[in-house]
Amino acid sequence: MRIHKSLLFFILLVFCFFSSANAQENSTTIPEWLILGPVETQLPVYHEQKNIQNKTFELSDLLSHEPVDVSAWHPEDGNVIGWSQNNELEWKSASGETLVLETNGSQHPQNYWAAFYLSSERFTEATLEVKSHHPFKLYINGTAKSTKTGSQDEDAEAGFQSEKLMLTQGKHLVMIRSMYDPENSADFTLSATVSWNSEASVSPSLTPMKTLDLETLSNQPSVSNLALSADGSLAAMRISKSSSPDGKTESWIEIRETDSGDLYREYKGTENFGRLQWAPEGLKFTYTESNDGKTTLWLSDLDTGSQQKLLEGVSDFGSYRWSPDGTFIIYTISEEPESNDSGVELLGDVEARRPWFGNRNFLYKLNVPDGTTQRLTAGSLTTSLLDISPDGTQLLYSRAHIDYSQRPYSISEYQLLNLETLETDSLFSANFGGGGSFSPNGETILFTGGPTMFGDIGVNVPEGTTPNDYDYQAFLYEIESANVTPITYDFAPSIDNAIWGDSNTIYFQTTDRSFNTLYKYDVRRSRFTKLTTELDAVSSVDISKDGSVAVYSGTGISQPIQVYTHDLEDDESTLLRYPGEDYFADVQFGEHETWTFTNERGTEIDGVIYFPPNFDPNKKYPVISYYYGGTVPVNRAFGGRYPKELYAAMGYIVYVMQPSGAVGYGQDFSALHVNDWGKIVSQEIISGVGEFLDEHEYADRENVGAIGASFGGFMTMLLMTETDIFAAAVSHAGISNLSSYWGVGYWGFQYNAVAAANSFPWNRKDIYVNQSPLFSADQVTTPLLFVHGAADTNVPLGESLQMYTALKLLGKETALVTVDGQDHHILDYKKYKLWKESIISWFDKYLKDQPDWWNHKYVD
């Protein structure tokens, strides 16, 4: 059957018309509002006079002045806002597609704030149109947008303002500051309509309750510089939080009573306030203040309220530490070598390409009573202070020097320095050394380091197996006899930090499977006892001098940063500070559960499942598989670089596993990392994801993503050459060519001193070639996104570039996003958010069949 050309054209025209109409038919007029006000205001004096731009001050100009910071507002019916002169305003709900604002016959301008929330189930482009006869200003998520400056009388149609919205998945606050014009007789009304042209579901509401979003995660409060007074009665901490939508932060110091949690003292406006330490006696503390590269050390006495400068204007000041009796302080100053401006330089050592390689740190002594100082160390090597003896007569320090004849290509010398004579006493040298601290009685030193720090005495792996020297152990070293006891020989957790209580008690901060926990060690009984903490991932801990109380901070799954005190006798924790309690009050988190499987070796492989909020087991959900695969497990900390809770909030099931080779599971387990480079781990990930999909019907096996960073980024690339079970993958700062990473990365050859012990490109091509994803790029079938900091010195950008180039030439689906000026970690606030959006939108494109967000960012 033949169709006439004119008829065909008419059919196509009608089709396009209805398609266009259908694309625009999604719209809603806001039916309910939250309102705050009215607040009467006045035009400034002399407003009728022309300014230097020859203009008079208009009513609408009042909108350019912000009477209050609204960036942190989360309106809700009944919420109260503090106002001037102890007045309060209350948010109230109101109904009506045309909102009528009461003026009460006022002859002065008045402010009202009207608000509502928009929820979108996916990324969509929308248009917001606001109408009023009076001026108004529009805010989206606390950020000022457009302003309607004019007024229209009652006979004219209300003026409007249109704003383009890019609604990411989640909830967004729309707020309108309306200004009543007393000279305009038109009704003081407001209406708003939202329209969009995608398949997204966009709905208005009056509740701020939401799932976790990137904005909330990026601006969450943080805690640092946690420290206890000597008697344990006071805890100091620095609180930081974003003070504006552009990520600028404000910080302050809080000192709280540990028994009640009450605020004892607060220091605000202290951007340069840093490195707080309590004095060993009394309620005194020191802190540093830095300006223009120079540091002043202050002593503050809470009892007397006095302040004293101990050091002033010191250049290149480093760390410092109080002596046990409080009579002196040991501090460090860094010295730099003479600069070479010729542009031509002989590279004397492999590490010399690191900009700070030539810097050296030296020790100084400050006598607190009289303020005199003394230089203690010099020479060609950095002296690193480890501890001060309990009687204050000796320093324990280390010096490291290069030795390319054996791994890890540096040797640490541990020495004692007599502070009276400046004579040194060499204790020992170690290849895989770490920290050290004196016991309170001064007879023993606790050292932490790799299993081989003291030869084979701390090694607990089968004969012929090379231990993982990133799996830190603890040793007791008797000073008089030089006897060494490996106290963690049969202790599976890896040691992160250690603090003496008394001479018979040590407290350990550990990596304990996927947890970060605290343990108490009884020296006489050689017994570890796990402390009962309220956080899955303890990040910082301090213990009072008398050993009665501890203070710790950390996070957990769906548990933002918190601070607890801990009664060490009763083993009980009490919440001291939760800075995000109000901030996260409106955030709904999903559930989680532990899920494990048994690998082909018969070993249980640990894992956690993160569920979306309002999870329905009868639905199908796309899956993101996250792993690291290197030497540390992915812990249960909240947020971080790869926030599992955020991915879950975006509608994904997130499965996190802990493959073989990670510390925290015992030396046998961690030793599997050495000279493996992904052979064991890749098969565990493939089989683990397969079993996970088989056992969980709600997991959509057709839409599974994979993501990893650094060693995990390498694992992502390697996995894509070995399996097609993934529908999309992301590699951040991954390694594609092991030999180039080994030689070019700042720490490549040193990391491989453990990860590829005694293995090199010339004697182990089975590792450096066969395990390098680049040489199997033709096997990749999965869309693969590379994200990489352009200034990454740990894993250079070339590692992603090589694999990206290979996949482009092979015609594979791939993309590369570089982050300018960022190193191995993406720290810049705005770039962090764009980086995160790239990752999520890539997964949305391939795992949800929602390419709009990715296309908006990089295609349209």
Image (cartoon, helix red, strand yellow):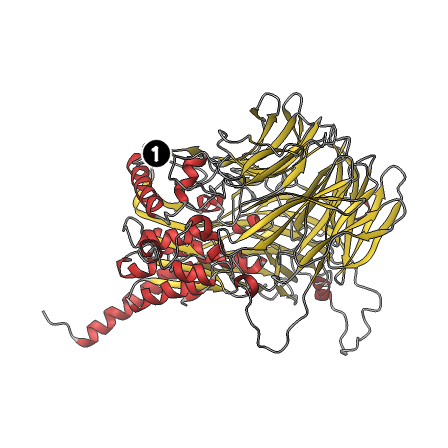
- Image quarter hosting the N terminus: bottom left
Q: Relative to 570, say whether 514 is above or below.
A: below
Foreground residue among 677 and 231: 677
Q: Relative to 102, say whether 150 is above or below.
A: below
Classify residue 441 by image quadrant. top right
Res 676 seen here: yes
Foreground residue among 659 and 89: 659
Q: Is residue 175 left or right of residue 611?
A: right
Whole-percent x and y of residue 649? 46, 44
Res 564 seen here: no
Foreground residue among 155 and 37: 37
Q: How many callouts does the rendering have?
A: 1
Mark 1 residue type: Phe
Whole-percent x and y of residue 529? 57, 24
Q: Is residue 517 left or right of residue 427?
A: left
| Residue at the (30%, 63%) spot, across then down | 812
Whole-percent x and y of residue 332? 73, 52
Q: Which residue is mark 1?
A: 597
- Other residues around mark 1 within 10 Å, as few (<14) / some (14–19) / many (≥20): some
Foreground residue among 521 and 796: 521
| Residue at the (33%, 51%) spot, across then down | 719
Whole-percent x and y of residue 796? 47, 62
Q: Could you say whether the residue bearing mark 1 is in a helix, strand or loop? A: strand
Q: Relative to 712, say whether 533 is above or below.
A: above
Given the current orientation, which residue lies at the most extreme left position? 1
| Residue at the (32%, 36%) spot, across then down | 599
| Residue at the (34%, 44%) spot, across then down | 680
Q: Relative to 250, say whether 1 is above or below.
A: below
